[in-house]
Each structure stands twice: as structure tokens, then as C-alpha cells.
């Protein structure tokens, strides 16, 4: 591949994947004008005037997150996790569609009188929203692996909702959904206990206190 940059070479190697990163890699491979020596900023600059759809940028950010962290093929892990936990959504975990509708934010109020089928479809869309936040999921997996020691017992001092606020203080975008945090913690492998719509995890209190002390200096 000659003078191909490390990032572009890595991305092209992903072309056999059956996910949006693989699709992006195939598009780049087919583009004879693509600047193979470009770094991350160069790739972004090249793509910007050509393709403006949100999904393309989410795929690019997802690819960058995997490249930087080494957390590859996260889509497969998320799909397996969601199959195992059919109530896991962007909002949280452990609720049926009816329970979810009774607790979600006001923008869904107009849908609460819909049929059960319609409610189930909207709830499924909420589940699928997790897949739109792969860069956040990958970042959170890497952050947890690097900063939060696992323990065998559940730490009931903190819910996923509180823990996601702690992680947000370090995250590049400044926001993480409850569902993203729960999915990331499950993928890492912490013991967990569901307390709908949240979860509690086997995470070291010492690690969490250290992060809480560090957060004000980093934000």
C-alpha cells in the first residue's frame, strides 16, 4: 500500500466487515482519488465536501474511536448484548415498552395513547438508537477498562445514571446516555444487577473516588 497513512491502511483493512465501518472502508477503497497518505484530519477534510449525511460522519467517528482505542468490531458485541437483553435501550434497561413510556421524557407524551404495536415499534427505535452512538460506546468501554477496577460484588452506592454523569466529565462530547454506559459496562464484563431503568455494577469504590477527585481538574 506504499505510503498509505497508518489510519487509512487500518481503515481499508476493515472492508470485509458487515457494518458501517466496513461500508466506509469499501467506499474509500473504490475511490481512486482518495488521499491514501492523509492523517485523520486529512481524511475528514476530504470527506466533508463529498458526503454530508449524518450516518457517514457517525461511521467515520466510529472508525476513529476503534482505531484509537483498539476496541474493534464493537457492533458485533453490541448486537449480541441486545439480543441477550431485549429491554436494553438508549434510555436504560429492564423496562417493557409500557413501563418505558410511563417514565420517559415529555417529547413522547403524545405517543402514550398509541396502540401496543405502535408503542413497541417506538421502543424498538429507542433500542436501535444505541447503534447511532458507537463512538460514545467505544470511548466508554476504553475509559472503563483504563480507569475503573472491577470487583466481584455489586457496588450499590452508585447507579448507572450517576456513573454516566461521572464519565461525562471526561468524555470528548460531554454527554453519554444511560444506555450507552450500561452497554459499555456489560461489554467490559463488570458484574451487574438491574434496577430499572438503571443498573448497578461491580466497580471499585476506590477507583470511582479517584475519578471524582480528578474530574474537577480535568474539566
Image (cartoon, rainbow, N blue to C red):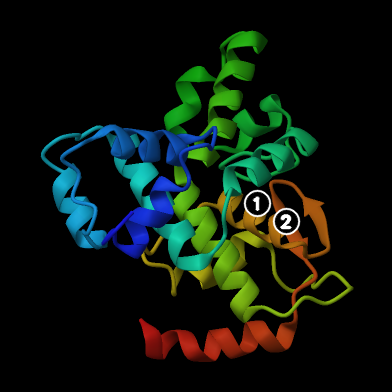
Is label 2 in a helix, a strand or a loop?
helix
Q: Tell which of 115 and 209 is nearer to you.
A: 209
Residue drawn at x 45%, y 61% as measured from the top left: 67
Q: Tell which of 129 and 107 is nearer to you.
A: 129
Residue 144, compared with residue 20, is above or below; it is below
Characterize the local packing of mark 1: few (<14), some (14-19) or many (20 or more) Cα atoms within 10 angstroms. Answer: many
Q: Can residue 17 be seen in this view?
A: yes
Q: Quadrant of residue 155?
A: bottom right
Q: What's the CA distance linking mark 2 and mark 1?
A: 5 Å
Give the percent coordinates (x, y) of residue 139: 50, 63
Residue farthest toward the right in the current orientation of the protein:
153
Is label 1 in a helix, a strand or a loop?
helix
Q: Mark 2 points at which residue?
A: 186
Q: Name the residue under label 1.
A: 183
Do labels 2 and 1 touch, CB within 8 Å? Answer: yes
Residue 89, compared with residue 176, is above or below; it is above
Amino acid at each position: 500500500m506504499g505510503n498509505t497513512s497508518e489510519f487509512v491502511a487500518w481503515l481499508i483493512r476493515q472492508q470485509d466487515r458487515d457494518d458501517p465501518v466496513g461500508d466506509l472502508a469499501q467506499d474509500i477503497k473504490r475511490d481512486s482519488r482518495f488521499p491514501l497518505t492523509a492523517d485523520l484530519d486529512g481524511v475528514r477534510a476530504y470527506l466533508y465536501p463529498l458526503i454530508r449525511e449524518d450516518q457517514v460522519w457517525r461511521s467515520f467517528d466510529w472508525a476513529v474511536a476503534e482505531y484509537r482505542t483498539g476496541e474493534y468490531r464493537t457492533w458485533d458485541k453490541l448486537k449480541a448484548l441486545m439480543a441477550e437483553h431485549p429491554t436494553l435501550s438508549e434510555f436504560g434497561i429492564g423496562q417493557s415498552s409500557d413501563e418505558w413510556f410511563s417514565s420517559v421524557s415529555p417529547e413522547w407524551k403524545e405517543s402514550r395513547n398509541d396502540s401496543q404495536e405502535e408503542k413497541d415499534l417506538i421502543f424498538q427505535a429507542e433500542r436501535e438508537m444505541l447503534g447511532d452512538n458507537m463512538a460514545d460506546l467505544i470511548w466508554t468501554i476504553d475509559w472503563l477498562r483504563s480507569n475503573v477496577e472491577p470487583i466481584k460484588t455489586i457496588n450499590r452506592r452508585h447507579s448507572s445514571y450517576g456513573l454516566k454523569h461521572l464519565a461525562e466529565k471526561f468524555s470528548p462530547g460531554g454527554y453519554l446516555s444511560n444506555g450507552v454506559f450500561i452497554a459499555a459496562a456489560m461489554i467490559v464484563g463488570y458484574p451487574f444487577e438491574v434496577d430499572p431503568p438503571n443498573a448497578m455494577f461491580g466497580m471499585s469504590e476506590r477507583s470511582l473516588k479517584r475519578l471524582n477527585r480528578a474530574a474537577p481538574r480535568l474539566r
